[in-house]
Amino acid sequence: MNNTKLTKLLNVQYPIIMAPMFLVSDTRMIIEALNSGITAAFPALNYRTDDDFRAAIDEIKLASDKPFGINLIVNKSNPKYPQQLITCIEKNVDFIITSLGSPREVIEKAKPKGIKVFCDVTNVQYAKKVVDLGADAIIGVGAEAGGHAGNIKIKDLIVQLKAEFDIPIISAGGVATKSQIDEMLAAGADGVSVGTVFIAAEECGVSDDYKQALVDYKANDIVRTSNLSGSPLTVINTPYVQKIGTEANFLMRMMIKHKKLRKILKLIIAVQGMNQIKKSAFGASYKTYFVAGPSIEYINEVRPLKEIVEDLV
């Protein structure tokens, strides 16, 4: 575990990325992860202003000299992306994870500065595109991932990617134990991206209700909803989710029907979804959307982040 392509690429002790989680990942969690021997990333969208985003990067750099990354949503549903990319380059972050779009611009601007670019992919076809563009690593997002999951079982996806590419391959989805990490490494992964289990860390700033839901619910309680972000998103099947259902809402149906309005409608849906997730994650609400993956099966209590890492390694 201490000697993989990912540990060598980033010069970290363990080949684990604490996954960037929308609204969840914050500086306290990142710093604790770095101090525990793993690396971590957070979404640039977790900060409303560029000043706040820059301050978060500075805070982490002041606390640790270990490598960490930033997740950028690179499609037009993220109007802040151009400035976020500029900030990442000016702040010389260690790596950028690109999601939901073409990483071409990120690779062209980041790599000359020595910033590594990791690209989320859900299949071999898209992986070929990002490898041809010059990605430094591929993050294979499997069907077991929390949040925006893929459609291929993670082990199958890793085997497919390993057969095609020589650059580091990172497994994302369904990992919550050391044995599962060992299984992914044996299948050909050079590292793993782990998210859901870290939401149940004491250092995580989400509500106690959210953390308790991670303990109380299990893998078969995870469902995909099309109501939140414009793309299918995995959430816990709370009574509220059961009540309103998981099928596309009115705006989603409009987006599918009207190609000319699709970009505008997707942006509106994304903003509405972000606000709903934020209300659920940080405040008491009967409208509870708790984003998580099936690895909640292995969460039995809320613990210090360092203890979670110790169990993983």
Image (cartoon, helix red, strand yellow):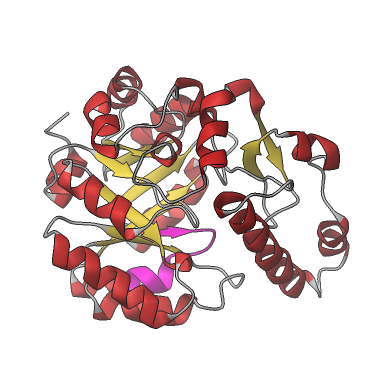
Q: Which residues are magenta?
A: 98-108
Residue lying at 56% horizontally and 68% vertically, measured from the top left:
75
Residue that appears at 18% across and 37% down: 14
Place of residue 155 in the rendered image (x, y in percent of width and height, measured from the top left)? 44, 25
Q: Quadrant of residue 96?
A: bottom left
Residue 93 visible in the shown view: no
> In the depicted view, which residue is nearer to us: 90 or 157?
90
Q: Quadrant of residue 12?
A: top left
**237 shown above or below 138:** above
Magenta stretch contains residue 102: yes
- Residue 160, image x and y in percent? 43, 31
Relative side of 46 to 286, left or right: left
Q: Give the answer, above or below, for where 177 lies relative to 57.
A: above
Q: At 81% from the left edge and 63% from the top edge, which residue is drawn? A: 255
Work out whether residue 30 can be spotted. Answer: yes
Quadrant of image for the N terminus: top left
